Amino acid sequence: LVITSPPYWNLKRYNENPDQIGHIDDYEVFLKELQKVWQDVYRVLVPGGRLVCVVGDVCVSRRRFGRHLVFPLHSDICVMCRKIGFDNLNPIIWHKIANASFEVPN
């Protein structure tokens, strides 16, 4: 069993680390780097093992991008994980009003 919550793209300021994918500006490049993580997870899980991913979609402001956009991060993760070999199960939806804009220290 792997339980994780990946970075919300570049919406939060994460700890400075050269390997931190949360600082990538381009959404498609971010997804490609995130796919490498899911491939490693798939590799280390036993057959039938489970991946639990706590993630929300990414809303970007009009101020930052010139228009309001919602990037379907949860959906993109489901698609890439299915292509890797995971068996997608029904999602559990938690209607969360807002995400924090800061990282919680470990």
Image (cartoon, helix red, strand yellow):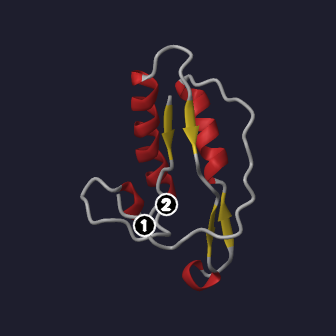
Vertical order, 38 against 21 (above or below): above
Front one among 63 and 56? 56
Q: How many marks?
A: 2
In front of the other: label 2 or label 1? 1
Q: Position of residue 16 (x, y in %)?
A: 27, 66
- What's under tag 2, amino acid-wise? Trp
Across and down, in percent, residue 85 comes to 56, 22
Tell me the residue that label 1 is attached to. Answer: 103
Q: Within 10 Å of the Cα at label 2, are there few (<14), some (14-19), or many (20+) other Cα atoms?
A: many
Residue toward you, 28 or 95: 95
Q: Is residue 33 left or right of residue 78?
A: left
Quarter of the image holding residue 100?
bottom right
Residue name at image x 72 percent, y 39 percent: 91
Q: In terms of secondary structure, where does tag 2 sit?
A: loop
Which residue extends farthest left?
18
In the rendered image of this protein, does residue 5 appear above or below residue 43?
below
Q: Residues within 10 Å of mark 1 (few under 14, many from 20)?
A: few
Q: Please name the residue shown 64% across and 48% down the image.
A: 74
Q: Are marks 2 and 1 in contact (CB under 8 Å)?
A: no
Residue type pointed to by label 1: Glu
Which is more N-terminal, label 1 or label 2?
A: 2
Tell me which residue sits at (44%, 53%) in the image: 29
* Mark 1 residue element: loop
| Residue 9: image tag | 2
Marker disc for residue 20:
none
When the figure is inspected, residue 61 is found, relative to residue 1, above or below; the finding is below
Q: Quadrant of the C terminus?
A: bottom left
